[in-house]
Image (spheres, rainbow, N blue to C red):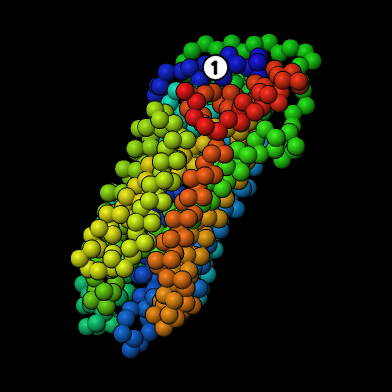
């Protein structure tokens, strides 16, 4: 089957970069822009939610979300995302990429609006409805991971495929940036219109009633880019690889790609008696061909996200160190939102966004394997450089150095495994499993994110319970948590050796779909071992 379909697929592989490639990047990328905005904007408003709904009369400091509520508000979207990655990844292989692609976007639009309209005046009712909508928002976001990666990989030519998939993922950086900039604008406008004294001067008056609109507007606006993209997603044709290799309609694939590429592609006549039973997901044959690959993509993404999402542990120290966020009691509610948004925007601008686009620039030059190894290596180096002399970094005069080391750690996460773990699963599995395997890999990553964001939040607490944050048990301390994160990065470095290099190869070459039809049984083992090679080729 693969042999007769090579004309339409080869046309995609050798196509010059043209307008439809950039259209596909924008259409898929706007989903990721929205994903990032929706997932990260909640961190901009959690302090405000604490002030509005958990104010305690006579308290020295402003109200904050209790640990269990903070974990629910921040973590419920991760749980939804993990579920959505598995479900929509599977559905994308069953129904087709295009049919499922619109569903995820509509869920994101509806649930962004629902999150902002969370009803009720009691803290319990508002937080419960917010968590409900954020779970389903995460569910829709989860579907965008496997579908966007798979669609972009199947539309791309083999020469620049890595850069195109990485560019879709890099739109996350702009989503984080947009969330910060919008929060700055809204909080500044409300602060100007509704002035208030700092908390230490007027505890009740420091949070104006209109502050309740601020967080709702910030959350709701996440629906806008998704809604604007919906029409264009529905106009995209199904990918040729799904139509030809999974739906087995080569004529339709040739017709669709003739329009997209604006060249005439003839579908070759189907030969009788050529159908052959194909192995299923998790069959012995699948595990023999792709078991190590799937182990490699799931473990590296899991380990990377533990380290990547643990960054929240140190942000408050960093922001305080450079004077970006003064003590909460010295600000009113809107001033605090403004300061937090400004700090996160600067981090995104200086560290997050450049790292993503370095990957886009170099992934098809030096390859996925090299970038991922390099990223894990430097993350390990900088984590240990922060951890071993941790007491040195706590002195005020050395804290700028701490900020620089921290920024470099996450620059090499983005110019490294944070991007490549997204790209590779979309390239190395057969078309009929591609979306499912990407969903499994990304869900493994989201499990790592939950461990990183919440497991390490508890682990990093002071060993002395009296010095731990309110509501938390004693932990192992920040220094030991950083050493543990360094070990996590070392494991990521070694598991990278299970992941094959896809630079310059067609998807069928990487997935072994040509071999399924063409390799005689006595040669298949030898060929299979060749296709399982996990080091870069020259």
Q: Residues within 10 Å of mark 1 (few under 14, many from 20)?
A: some
Relative vertical location of residue 360 with respect to residue 484 in this rendering, above or below: above
Question: Residue 320 at x, y = what percent?
Answer: 26, 67
Question: Residue 273 at x, y = what percent?
Answer: 79, 15
Who's the residue at 61% across and 20% down the image?
A: 252
Question: Residue 106 at x, y = what percent?
Answer: 52, 47
- Asked where in the image residue 404 lies, by quadrant, the reply is bottom left
Relative vertical location of residue 22 with respect to residue 13 in this rendering, above or below: below
- In this rendering, position of residue 341 left or right of residue 470: left
Q: Is residue 377 visible?
A: yes
- Of residues 487 and 259, the one nearer the viewer is 487
- Of residues 407 and 238, the one nearer the viewer is 407
Total count of labels: 1
Who's the residue at 43% across and 80% down the image?
A: 464
Label 1: which residue?
10
Q: Is residue 315 visible?
A: no
Who's the residue at 40% across and 30% down the image?
A: 366
Question: Residue 365 at x, y = what percent?
Answer: 39, 28
- Asked where in the image residue 290 lies, by quadrant, the reply is top right
Q: Residue furthest front?
A: 388
Task: Classify the position of the N terminus by image quarter.
Answer: top right
Q: SS at mark 1?
A: helix
- Of residues 350 and 118, the one nearer the viewer is 350
């Amino acid at each position: 089957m693969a042999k007769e379909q090579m004309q339409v697929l080869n046309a995609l592989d050798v196509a010059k970069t043209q307008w439809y490639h950039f259209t596909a990047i924008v259409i898929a990328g706007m989903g990721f822009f929205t994903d990032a905005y929706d997932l990260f904007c909640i961190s901009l408003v959690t302090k405000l939610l604490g002030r509005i709904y958990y104010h305690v009369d006579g308290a020295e400091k402003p109200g904050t979300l209790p640990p269990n509520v903070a974990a629910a508000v921040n973590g419920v979207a991760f749980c939804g995302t993990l579920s959505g990655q598995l479900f929509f990844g599977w559905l994308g292989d069953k129904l087709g990429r295009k049919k499922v692609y619109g569903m995820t976007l509509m869920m994101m639009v509806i649930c962004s609006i629902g999150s902002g309209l969370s009803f009720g005046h009691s803290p319990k009712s508002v937080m419960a409805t917010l968590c409900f909508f954020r779970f389903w928002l995460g569910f829709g976001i989860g579907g965008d991971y496997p579908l966007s990666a798979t669609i972009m990989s199947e539309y791309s030519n083999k020469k620049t495929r890595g850069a195109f998939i990485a560019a879709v993922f890099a739109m996350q950086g702009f989503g984080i940036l947009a969330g910060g900039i919008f929060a700055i604008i809204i909080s500044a406008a409300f602060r100007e219109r509704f002035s208030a004294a700092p908390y230490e001067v007027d505890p009740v008056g420091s949070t104006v009633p209109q502050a309740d609109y601020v967080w709702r507007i910030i959350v709701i606006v996440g629906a806008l880019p998704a809604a604007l993209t919906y029409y264009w997603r529905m106009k995209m044709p199904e990918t040729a690889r799904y139509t030809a290799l999974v739906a087995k309609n080569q004529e339709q694939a040739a017709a669709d790609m003739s329009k997209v590429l604006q060249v005439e592609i003839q579908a070759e006549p189907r030969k009788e008696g050529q159908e052959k039973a194909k192995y299923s997901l998790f069959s012995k044959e699948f595990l023999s061909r792709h078991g190590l690959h799937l182990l490699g993509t799931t473990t590296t993404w899991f380990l990377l996200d533990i380290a990547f999402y643990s960054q929240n542990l140190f942000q408050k120290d960093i922001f305080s160190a450079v004077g970006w966020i003064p003590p909460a009691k010295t600000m009113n509610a809107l001033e605090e939102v403004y300061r937090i948004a400004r700090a996160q925007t600067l981090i995104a601008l200086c560290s997050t966004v450049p790292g993503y686009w370095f990957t886009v620039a170099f992934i098809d030059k030096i390859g996925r394997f090299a970038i991922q190894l390099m990223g894990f290596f430097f993350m390990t180096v900088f984590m240990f450089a922060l951890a071993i002399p941790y007491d040195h970094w706590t002195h005020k005069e050395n804290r700028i150095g701490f900020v620089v080391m921290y920024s470099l750690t996450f620059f090499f996460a983005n110019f490294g495994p944070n991007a490549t773990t997204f790209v590779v699963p979309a390239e190395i599995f057969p078309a009929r499993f591609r979306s499912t395997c990407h969903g499994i890999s990304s869900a493994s990553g989201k499990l790592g994110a939950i461990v990183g964001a919440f497991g390490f939040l508890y682990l990093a607490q002071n060993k002395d319970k009296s010095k731990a944050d309110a509501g938390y048990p004693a932990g192992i301390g920040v220094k030991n948590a950083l050493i543990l994160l360094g070990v996590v990065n070392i494991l990521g470095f070694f598991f990278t050796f299970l992941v094959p290099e896809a630079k310059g190869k067609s998807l069928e070459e990487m997935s072994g779909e040509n071999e399924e039809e063409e390799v005689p049984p006595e040669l298949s083992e030898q060929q299979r071992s060749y296709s399982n090679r996990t080091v870069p080729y020259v």
